Image (spheres, rainbow, N blue to C red):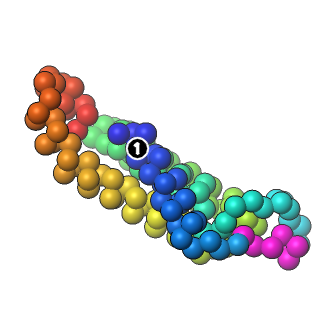
Amino acid sequence: AFGLVAVSGWVASEFFKILVARQRPNPALLFDPLAPETGTDSFPSGHVSFAVTLAFAVYFLARGTRWAKFAAVAGVVAAAVVAWSRLYIGVHYPSDVVGSVLAGSAAVMLLTGCWNWLAPRAWKRLPVNAATRRFLL
């Protein structure tokens, strides 16, 4: 489940990159470009989407423990640092970063909603002991 949550941001990002196909900012217009050669489309930022979904995944692992608050704060800080870095080096517009946070969060919500709906039904049919079931759900 951890891997699915973490990867969901990348999947959402790639989906919207194909759908929107927006070019990255022109590095020639920057005062001192840090990334002069840009590659794929701009919207949304895959780095930010992955950082957001990874933060969710780590929080979900820490949920219910004494580390939950730390995981939430560290996740928000890490995602903000990644977002700022993408803006600072000039490879994304601010709307790319905001869209990435929304796309990554939406992907996590969709995935966890489907997981919470489907997993209990599936586990009832499988011969899994109670400890394993509690760990996976």
Q: Residue at x 76, y 67 (%)?
A: 90
Crowding around mark 1 (Cα neighbors within 10 Å: few <14, some 14 to 19, many 20+) is: some
On-image quarter of the C terminus: top left
Task: Give coordinates of residue 110: x percent, y percent.
Answer: 32, 58
Q: Which residue type does callout 1 highlight?
A: Leu
Left or right, residue 39 beside residue 22: right
Quickly name the residue at label 1: 4
What is the number of callouts on the image?
A: 1
Residue extending furthest toward the front? 18
On-image quarter of the N terminus: top left
Task: Give coordinates of residue 57: x percent, y percent.
Answer: 41, 45
Work out whether 1 lies above or below 46: above
User: Is 28 inside the magenta-drawn segment?
Assistant: yes
Residues in magenta?
24-30
Residues 47 and 63: in front is 47
Q: Residue at x 72, y 70 (%)?
A: 24
